[in-house]
Amino acid sequence: MRTRSISTATALAVLSGSVVLSTMAAGPASAATVTIGSPAGIVVSGALGRVFIGDDTTDSIVATDYTGERVDSVSGIDGIFDLALSEDGATLYATARGSHEIVALDAATLDVKARYPVATKIGPLYLEATGGKVWFTYEDPTDGHGDLGSVDPAADPAAGTDPVALRQLPHENPGVGGGPYIDSDPSAPGMLAIGGTDFFDMTKDLMAVVDVSGATPRLTAWHDGGYALNYVSDIDLVPGAAQVLVDGTDRHTYANGTFSPAGAYPAGRGADIAPNGLVAQLGPIGDNTVAVHRPGASTPIRTYTADAHALAWAPDSSRIFALVSGPRGYVLKTLTDPAKSVTTLTVDAPATAARAKKLTVTGRASATVPLPSGTRLQITRTDLESPGGKALPAVTLKPDGTYSFTDTPPAGGTVTYKAAWAGDSGHTPVNATDRTEVSRAATALTLNRNGNTYDYGADVSFTAHLGTTYKNRTVEIWADPYGGDKPKKLLKAAKVNSNGNISATVDMTRDTVVSAVFKGDARYKPRTVTSTAYARVKISTAVSRHYKTARIGSTSYYWFHKNTDPLLTTSMTYYKGRKHRFDLQVYAGGKWHSDVSRYFPLGTNGKSAVTLEAPGVTGLRLRMRSAYVNGSSGDNVNSTTYGAWKYLYFSK
C-alpha cells in the first residue's frame, strides 16, 4: 500500500486569517457443385439417376446426380458440341467438332467405348439416337450446306462396313447454312425432326420430319415454303401428336407430306418436351423465366424464375433440369413439381380486436389452373390458450376464390389465423397466416422499497404485490446491480401467495434496480415495475502515530506531538478505478473551516494511507474524514457515503 502525504500549510493559514482550499477533480462460425463454362448438350438418364452435361470450355462431360452434385467426369472430347443417349440408355454419345468424330462412352462409367471419325470440315454438331442408329448434323464440306449423317454402332469396320454415313437427308438440300437442329422422341422411335435457318436466304429455311427406322431415311413431311417459319433455332417432336414445336413457340402439324400452322404458345426462345407432353419453355431474350405449358394451352401451369440456357426433362416427367447462369458460369438447377400450378393464398385478419367479441377473417386463393370446385381450406387459430394451434371449422372457397369466416377469440394477445390447403395432383400445397392483436385487461403490480438507501451488505426484502389475473399467478423478481461487470439476475420466480404477494431478498452491496415481472396470461397484459434501491459503501479510517487519546470538551481527540506526521489509513469497499475523498478541516474562532478536499485512489485491497505533514506548532486542532461521492469517486455503483470524523490535536 503506497502512502501519500498532504501538507498542513493551509491549516496554519487559517490561523492567520487566510483560508486556501484545494480540490482534486475526479478521474474519469460441402459438397462440390458443378459449374459449366460453356454448355454443350444436356441429357438425363432415369435408370442411372444422372444428368450428363457437355462443357465446351474444358472439352469434358460432367455427370451429376439429380441435385446437381458432381459424381463423375471425362475430358478429351475436343470441341464437344452435343450429347445423346442410346435408346437403351447404356451408351452416351458426344459430338466432337474439333476432332471431327462421334465419341461413344459407357453411360455408367464414362469410359470411352469407340470413336467414329466424320469426314467433314465443320462438325459433327447436333446429335440424336433413334431407330437403332446415332444421327448427327454437320456442314457439308463440298458446298457448305447443312446435312444429316448417321453412325451404325452395329456395323463392323473390320468386315469392311463403314459405320458412318453422310448425306442422309432424303431431299434436295435447300442450302441451309450450318448444321440443322434435330430431335427425336422415345414415343416415336425412328422419327427425326430436322430444322434450321439460313440467315442469308430465309427461303432456304428447313423444317422436316424424317423416318429413319428403315435401311434408308424416308421423308415424312417437308416444309414447302408456303408460309414463313420466322427462324428455326430449336425444334422438338411433340409426343403423341403429328406435330413439331419450333423455338418453343410455334406448333406445326404435318400430314400428306407437308406442314400447316397449328397455333402458338407465348413467345419463347426454345423448349424441351416431356414424355407426357408438357412443354418447358425458355422465355424470350431478357425474360429470365421457364414456363411449363400443357399441350396447346397458352396459359402456363407454372412459371419458374431462372436465367436458363438449356432445359432437359427427367424421363419420368417429374422435374426439369435447367442450366442456369451463375457468377462464374452455369450451374444445374432442378425445377420440381412442373405439372402443378402454384397456388397463392391470402389471409386478412383485423389488425386489432376485442377479446371475446366476434371478428371476421377474409382471404382469397388462386392459381393459373383454376382450383377445383368445393376446395376447402383448413383453418387454425394459435393464441396463448392454444400455443400449438386449435383447429376451427374448415371453409369452402367461393367460385371466385374468396372465403371468409368468423371467430370469437377467447384469449388476448397476438392471435394468429392460418389457412392451409394440401394441394392436389395439379396444384401445389399452400398456407398463409395473418395476425391480430386482441385486447387484454391491465392488472395491478407494485414493488416496495423504491428510493430507499441501505448500509453496505444489508439484506433487504423486496415485496411485489399482484392484482387480479386470469390464470397466471407467477411473478419474477430480478436484481440488476449498477456497473457493467455484474449481470441482471433472477432472484425468484414463483406464484404469489394468497394475498397476492411475493418477496425476495437482495444483498445490498451496490445500487440496484429491482424488477417485478408479470408475463401476462390470456386475459391480462404483461407488466413490469421497478424499484431502485441504493447501497452505501463500507468506510472507516484508522489513525496511527498518536501518543494518546483524550477529550477536549466532549470530543475525543488523537493527540500528536507537533513534529509528528499523523498516518490516516482509509478502508473502503473496493471497485475498479475507485477513489476516496479526503476532507480536512481546521478549528478556528470557535468554528470548523474546510481546508482541503482531495481524492486519493484505493489500492486493490480497498485501502489508502495518507500522511499528514506535522505542523510544527502546538494547539492546532484538525479533523478529517473519508467519503465516497457517487460519480466523483470514479464510479456510480454506490450511493454517496461519509465516514466518521477523526479529530486530531497537536501538542508539544
Image (cartoon, grey):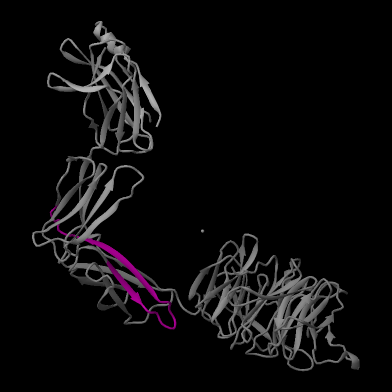
Compared with 574, 448 (above or below) is below
Q: Position of residue 638 (x, y in %)?
A: 27, 38
Q: Which residues are magenta?
A: 416-445
Q: Quadrant of the N terminus?
A: top left
Could you tell whether 528 is left or right of 181 in the image? left
Tell which residue pokes out farthest to the left in this image: 499
Q: Is residue 550 visible?
A: yes
Which of the pair 364/512 is nearer the observer?
512
Residue at (34%, 36%) from the top-left corner? 606
Q: Which picture quadrant has residue 587?
A: top left
Q: Tell me residue 224's x, y (percent).
A: 71, 80
Q: Would you identify the image quadrant in which residue 46 lies? A: bottom right
Q: Is residue 145 above or below residue 615?
A: below
For this orientation, the residue located farthest to the top is 16
Relative horizontal placement of residue 158, taking residue 465 as reference (left or right): right
Kindly indicate the quadrant of the structure image that contains residue 643.
top left
Residue 146 can be seen, yes or no: no
- Image location of residue 573, percent across then percent down: 30, 38
Which quadrant is home to the C terminus? top left
- Is residue 565 toward the left or the right of residue 189 in the image? left
Q: Is residue 310 magenta?
A: no
Q: Position of residue 634 (x, y in %)?
A: 34, 32
Q: Residue shown at 22%/60% (left/top)?
A: 493
